[in-house]
Image (cartoon, rainbow, N blue to C red):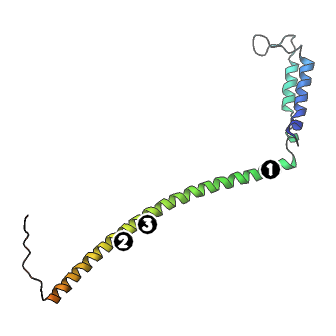
Amino acid sequence: MNANNAVSPFVQRVKEFRRKNADEVVLARSFGEFKGGKDSGLRELVSNTLEFDISSLLHPKSLLYIPIGAIVFLFQVYNTLAINSLAVKTEKLREQIQMTSSVITSQELKMDELHSIRNIARDAAALGLSPTSIPPVELEP
């Protein structure tokens, strides 16, 4: 259906009103005063406007398109909100992964340090060296 066909009855009523009452409706200086003393033309225009039948615009296809459009719109809004929620969760997980990898790295360094101390102690025992209770002397350069 064409939109012009649906609106045309209203447009035709307005055109008829203009033709019939062109001489009678002339606005004066203040609002509401009319030349010729007849304001029935304005009342007729208002009543014709209020009597406009909206059902001429609503066809069965229109009634199907409105809910479908609303569903598509709501689906798009839901997807946008879901994407934003997932982005926030992803950022939190990324921070947790960084913290976890930092802890793992520090534990690996500590493990390597202990492992190297153990290796030094084992090599020293193999050479016949034993630990002493005398504290080491630090030399200044």
Q: Nearer the viewer, residue 94 or 82?
A: 94
Count residues near mark 3 (Cα–Cα under 10 Å), then give few for <14, some for 14-19, many for 20+: few
Q: Amino acid at mark 2?
A: Ile
Q: Quadrant of residue 44?
A: top right
Q: Quadrant of residue 96?
A: bottom left
Instruction: Give the percent coordinates (x, y) of residue 7.
Output: 86, 35
Mark 2 to mark 3 CA distance (whole Å): 10 Å
Mark 2 to mark 1 CA distance (whole Å): 57 Å
User: Which numbered dot is residue 73?
Assistant: none
* Relative vertical location of residue 131 with respect to residue 141 in this rendering, above or below: below
Residue underneath mark 3: 97
Instruction: Give the percent coordinates (x, y) of residue 126.
Output: 17, 89
Instruction: Point out the frontmost of discs 1 and 3.
Output: 3
Secondary structure of residue under mark 1: helix
Q: Residue at 66% x, 53% y: name it.
A: 76
Mark 1 to mark 3 CA distance (whole Å): 47 Å
The reply to whether dot 2 and dot 3 touch (C-beta < 8 Å) is no
Q: Is residue 81 left or right of residue 66?
A: left
Secondary structure of residue under mark 2: helix
Q: Earlier in the sequence, mark 1 or mark 3?
A: 1
Count residues near mark 2 (Cα–Cα under 10 Å), then give few for <14, some for 14-19, many for 20+: few
Q: Residue at 20% x, 81% y: name it.
A: 120
Residue underneath mark 2: 104
Residue underneath mark 1: 65
The reply to whether dot 1 and dot 3 touch (C-beta < 8 Å) is no
